[in-house]
Image: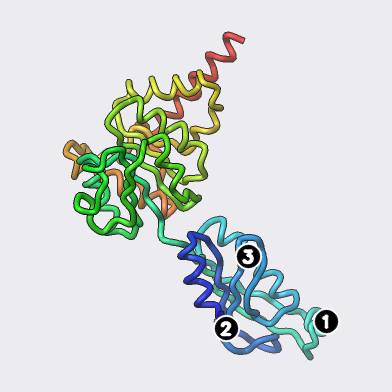
Amino acid sequence: MDIFQEIVRLRGEGRKAALATVVKWLGSTPRRDHAKMLVFEDGSTMGSIGGGSTEAEVVEEAGRVLETEKASLTKFKLTQEEAARDGLICGGTVEVFVEPILPDPSLLLMGGGHLAQAVAEAAQRVGFKVSVVDDRASFANPERFPEVEKTIVAPFEEGLDSMNVTENSFILIVTRGHGYDQVVLEKAIQTPARYIGLVGSRRKIRIIVKNLLEKGIPPAAFSRLYAPIGLEIGSETPQEIAVSVVAELIALRKGVHQRSKKQLFAMKLIEESGDQAEASG
C-alpha cells in the first residue's frame, strides 16, 4: 500500500495524519526529490524524507500540525556535524511542507424534525457527513433525509451508542422533548465529540444542565456544550436557524470561532452551580 492509498484508508476510518513533503533543498541533504512521509497520530511514520535528525524534527512538527490542524512550511538546517552523522559530506537546508490529513467532519442529528431537515441540507453542502437518529421511522428515513450517510431508527438513549463518535464529530440535539434532550446530552458529553449543540430556550437549558449536575455529572464535562445553538444573526425560521448553526460549525472547524455572550450561557450556568456548591460546602 502506498502513502496515498493509506490516506484514503485513514480518512475512511475517520482518523487523522500529517503528510510531510520536501519542497525545496539547498546543499547536501538526505533527499533531493519531493519525498513524502506520512506521520500518524501516535508518531509512527510511513515513507521517508531521508531519515536522520531532520526526519525526527519533521515528526515533531507533524505533531504540532495535527494539534492545530493547520499546515506549516518549515526550513530545517543540517549542520556539518549532523550531516557527517547522517553520512553526508556537508550540511544543507531543506524546506518541508507539513499538512494535516483530516477526515470529513461528521454531524450527528439527534432528532429528525423540521430543523434537523434544514440543518442536514445546509451541512451537506459544506462537506459534513450527516447521520440522523430518531425513534420514529416516519422521521428517520432516506425519503425524508436524502443523501445523508445514515438514518437510524432507535430509542434516543440507544441511538448515540450505535455511532462512531470521534474528535471530528459534531452532535446536534434536536429531539422533540426535554426528557429526550437530557438523555442524549448526558450521553453526548461522555463522548469525544468536538461540538455538542442543544436547541431550546435558556430556561430549558438551565433546567437540563441543573438536572445533570445534580446527578453528579462533573462541570468540566460540559466544556463542549454550545447552548443555545447557532450564531446570533436574528434567525427565526428553521432554514434561518440552520444557516446560523452551520456557520457556527464551520467557524469551529476553521478555528476562528469565539463564543458569543449567547453561547457562553451554558458555561455561565456551570460556573454558577460551582459557586453555589462551594458556598453550601
| First in sequence: mark 1 vs mark 3 | 3
| First in sequence: mark 1 vs mark 2 | 2
Tell me the number on the disc at residue 100.
none
Q: Which residue is label 1 attached to?
A: 85
Circle 3: residue type: Glu
Identify the residue at the far top of this view.
280
Compared to 190, does 18 lie above or below?
A: below
Circle 1: residue type: Arg
Position of residue 139 in the picture relative to residue 55 (left or right): left
Compared to 241, does 81 lie above or below?
A: below
x, y percentage for residue 152?
A: 33, 47
Q: Which residue is label 2 attached to?
A: 24
Q: CA distance from mark 1 to mark 3?
A: 22 Å
Tell me the number on the disc at residue 61.
3
Q: Nearer the viewer, residue 115 or 36?
A: 115
Residue appearing at x 48%, y 59% in the figure: 14
